[in-house]
Image (cartoon, grey):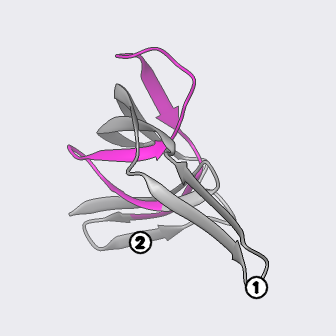
Amino acid sequence: MKYAIVEISGRQFWIETGKYYDFNRIPTELGKQITLNRVLLLNNEGEVLVGKPYLNSVTIKGKILEHLRGKKTIVYKMRPKKKTRKKQGHRQELTRVLIEDIIIN
């Protein structure tokens, strides 16, 4: 089993080939290839490589499947005893990326 831990858009993800992941919006076209090069850790069938802070010899190829919006979250602010209430919704802009290959140079 080959997997990698990657930093993208300020968060860290456990990445495996053949699966898709939802990242924060990446401003590129649909179907375009992207490369993820901020690899923090790689496990290649039991052989573990840890970067300091990144592994320069590992790149991850991905393909953008779609742009979508996340589930709605409700933001509700209320000041007690003041009759002040504010209800607001938020939907995060996301990009779904299919991980095609993990390349070790």
Which label is found at residue 48?
Answer: 2
Q: Find the residue positioned furthest to the bottom.
A: 81
The magenta span reads 13-42
Q: Nearer the viewer, residue 25 or 84?
A: 84
For marks 1 and 2, the one nearer the N-term is: 2
Residue 33 vs residue 39: left or right? left
Task: Establish if 98 lies above or below 56.
Answer: above
Disc 1 or disc 2, which is closer to the eye? Answer: 1
User: In this figure, which residue is indicated by the disc labeled 1?
Assistant: 81
Residue at 46% from the left image edge and 14% from the top image edge: 29
The kind of residue on which mark 2 rests is Val
Residue 98 vs residue 13: left or right? left
Membership of 14 in magenta stretch: yes
* Disc 1 secondary structure class: loop
* Disc 2 secondary structure class: strand
The reply to whether residue 60 is in sight is yes
- x, y percent for residue 53: 69, 64
Task: Establish if 44 lies above or below 88.
Answer: below
The kind of residue on which mark 1 rests is Lys
- x, y percent for residue 40: 56, 62
Residue 3, by quadrant, is bottom left
Residue at 76% from the left image edge and 85% from the top image edge: 81
